[in-house]
Image (cartoon, rainbow, N blue to C red):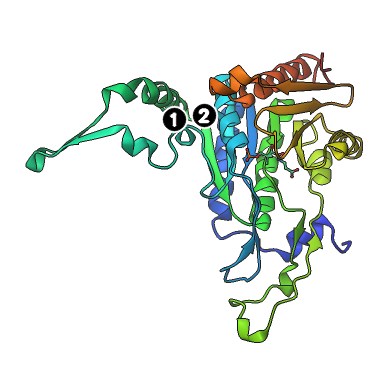
Amino acid sequence: MASGSWEEFFAVHLPPTDFEDNRTLLKEFCERHDKYGNKIVLVTSGGTTVPLEHNTVRFVDNFSAGTRGSASAEYFLEHGYAVIFMHRQKSLEPFTRHFSGQKLLDMLEIQERGPNTTITVRPDSVDVLAPVLVRYKAALAAGAVLQVAFTSVSEYFWLLRAACECLARLGPRALLYLAAAVSDFYIPKDRVPTHKMQSESGAPVIQLQLVPKMLAPLVNLWVPAAYVVSFKLETDESLLIPKARAALEKYKHKMVVANMLQSRHHRVILVSPEASQEIVLTREDIHAGVDIESAIVSEIVRLHAEHLAGGGAGAALP
Ligand code: PAZ
């Protein structure tokens, strides 16, 4: 087993404590939707942490709030996909993302009449709440969403591999939409202290190591027939497209959605081996609250359908 390889990562890092429960849920979900010939998308969302202690008080984190993943999950449901939403614990989730902070409480009114207290939705909030509630209840009734959560990078990888192993049975009907911001660096298990680091010991020297690239086994071994879309985030525009193209060349998957940190919510570039296509929201779109994920997901759904119609061989951007 090569040092720094993905095999070594799984050999060294133990699965999370709730792993078997999640694996059972993933298996049941995939078997059920496979039986009906449904398409399933795995949406990964939010950022992974790198713990600095085994009993974790402190960790390295990243910026991702799960905006992209949670919005995309809703649009995939609208397109008839069953959705595995694999997200960072406490990051944004489909449907509830519309009511973060105190928004939901502000939509409610309370009438306190002794034991007959009633809570109602403010009349001016019904139009906001009702459409989201209708879509949420429909997804629930159809059993169309399964949510599983991770926190650390190792929990993410264990869940990712388990989800892939369950999705493999769907062949090309499985779509992977890997929008999570996964740490490129971590601290190997044997160099992580058990207990909270103490300041009396002086300033700690922390040496990070490269995380193995899981896209390679994912594309080649775990879900070889699936339609795989990865994401690439950069802060230096000159690196964005070259790095997206390099990833496609290296891993041979179907698409990279390239985005810049500063503009990610109104501009992305869909890069495929054959072409690239920019999606940009206008000022009016942004003002009207249009989600860029609506256009991203529509285009990916179109390409996935072409891919399926072509027997899983490949489909080109316009
Ligand atoms: O979660 P968010 O909406 O704030 O950000 C989305 C994103 C930038 C994390 C995503 O679009 C993305 O690029 N993910 C991959 C990041 C990476 O290069 O690892």
Residue receiving disc 1: 140
Q: CB atoms at circles 1 and 2 under 8 Å apart? A: yes
Quadrant location, the N terminus: bottom right
- Quadrant of image for the C terminus: top right
Callout 2 secondary element: loop
Separation of residues labelled 1 and 2 (CA atoms): 6 Å
Residue 211 in the image: x percent, y percent? 79, 56
Q: Which residue is located at x 71 percent, y 16 percent? A: 302
As rendered, which of 288 and 198 lies closer to the eye?
288
Residue at point 63% right, 45% down? 64
| Left or right: where 189 falls relative to 246 | left
Name which residue lies at 64% across and 48% down: 63
Give how far across and how far down residue 46 sits, in percent: 62, 45
Label count reads: 2
Q: Residue shown at 67%/36% (left/top)?
A: 167
Q: Mark 2 points at which residue?
A: 144
In the image, what residue type sits under mark 1?
Leu
Q: What element carries label 1?
A: helix
Q: Does 27 sit left or right of 103 as displayed?
A: right
Near mark 2 (Cα within 10 A), the count class, few <14, some 14-19 or many ≥20, is: some
Task: Check the image and report above or below for 169 versus 24.
Answer: above
**Relative depth, front residue between 94 and 107:** 107
Dividing the image into four equal quarters, which quarter contains ligand 1? top right
Q: Residue 270 carries which label?
A: none
Q: For the residue with label 1, is its CB less than 8 Å from the closest atom of ligand 1?
A: no
